[in-house]
Amino acid sequence: MLFSNWFGKKKYRSVQEQVNQPPSNTISTSLVQNITYLHSQFSQTPDLVVRHFIIKKSGEQAALVYLNGLVDKSAINNNVLRPLQFEMGDGNAVDDITVDVGQIQSLFTWPHVENAILRGNSILFVNGQTKASALGTQGWPQRAIEDSQIEVSLKGAHQGFVETGSQNIALIRRYIQNRELKIKELVVGRRGNTLVSILYLADVANPEVLKELEDRIQQLDVDVILNTGELAEFIEDNPYSPFPQFITTERPDAAASQILQGRFAVVVDCSPSVLIAPAAFMSFFQNIDDYSTRWSISTFIRLLRMFAFFIAIFLPAFYIAVISYNFEIIPVKLLLTIGEFRGRVPFPPFLEAIIMELTLEMMREAGVRLPAPVGQTVGIVGGIVIGQAIVQAGFISNTMVIIVAFTAIASFILPNYDMVAAVRLIRFAMMIAASMFGFVGIIIALMTMIGHLIALESLGTPYGTPFAPVRFADWKDTFVRLPLWTMVKRPLGTRATQSQKQGSNRPKGDGK
């Protein structure tokens, strides 16, 4: 009895092993064996749905497999199951599937079947066939297209990217309706199999830059890429630089504008933002509204942004250097006023500035993490109450509160969030240098920053272009923004193969 039970269990295990391990990962002709193997691979997956039915045309047994929640059930019932169960097709119902779905793909190996199921396809197995059919019935939860919350535009389009890669690509195609807009798809991750799409103009974009970008993405060996920020950190040229080396945008019109200049847009599925590469330092001070307003107004705003950039980095450091080392350059009346306010402050200027800057950073993070109505209250009330109380307590001088307020306002002017984050970090380095060596320390830190910008690259393209290396032709769209009809060529910094962008003629009215 024991021997027979042991033999029976061993025989049962051998049969199960044969079922669970199909030879060479190929699909079996047995529908039962295919479904059994599928259940073994997707164990503890209650959302895996298997629907058995008979194909009316051929009379063959079939099964439709999908993950509940990743498919459009209406499309499955009306466009797949109903035609196969109740309608007679013209020809073989297996080789010529009579279903009304967007895409049908034949699969012959189990890894392809598993990936297709996880991507939201429904898989059709037919008894006697050594292939499966992946039907495009995706229908996962997704939000509607809304305006970007980070990149606010006054005169531009009010559409932002969403978490579905195919919709993001469609939004870009709406702006670039040209057959030269090409898409190269890559799959990244051992577990997540994230779909990464590279969009570019084939007759404009540089193929060497494309190959460099593609090679870096293909060499990634990670479990999964969840968003564009993770991808950028893996493939950027210098991971230790505080400056962003890729432009991150949530606006399809901004992405289309960059593609037309010869750059590449990297769309990561499940991420509501798109990477733009290669990037230049001046690109982070440009906004899509710059091209929707008159060129004179845009030039003024850009100069204001550059002024705000230097204020946000150097103003606290300048204050520390003046008060600690070079107070003789301050006019006497102003010096007496500052001295009156600082008379009760027990801390040196550097520690005073650090306390205020850290307080500002904590208030900023508190305002971001809390719900919107509460966050605004924390920002306004917290700034007034804490600022007034800390001055009256004698911990901080009125002058330092003014300095920090100007610095915060200057950082809010910058249009790119990644550059703002870099400025916040560099500001502390400048304050440390000023506290140690005064103006000499600020100059050394400034020279170090400029040298770093000159040496930095984005996908092998100089980050400091068009100033390092000097390219005077590109200065029309940097600190200033000349009229659009004068910018007839694409920026040299993108290394585009087709430089001509438009003609230089401009229609003239009666006034000439």
Image (spheres, grey):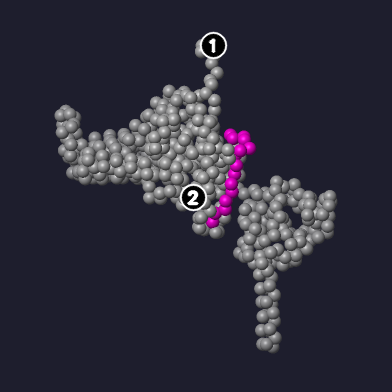
Upstream in the sequence, badge 2 or badge 1?
Answer: 2
Is-magenta flag for residue 177?
Answer: yes
Q: Is residue 441 left or right of residue 482?
A: left
Residue depicted at 84% across the width and 50% down the height: 90
Q: Position of residue 266 (x, y in %)?
A: 53, 45
Could you say whether the residue bearing mark 2 is in a helix, strand or loop?
A: helix
The span shown in magenta is: 175-189
125 or 79, which is in the foreground? 125
Is residue 201 something that shows in the picture? Answer: yes
Q: CA distance from mark 2 to mark 1?
A: 53 Å
**Marks 2 & 1, CB-CB < 8 Å contact:** no
Q: Is residue 485 above or below residue 6?
A: above
327 or 63, which is in the foreground? 327
Q: Position of residue 107 (x, y in %)?
A: 69, 57
Residue annotated with mark 1: 510
Residue annotated with mark 2: 231
Q: Position of residue 225 (x, y in %)?
A: 51, 53
**Of the residues shown, which amino acid type is indicated by label 2?**
Leu
Residue depicted at 68% across the width and 83% down the height: 7
Q: Residues within 10 Å of mark 1 (few under 14, many from 20)?
A: few
Disc sitting over residue 119 in the figure: none
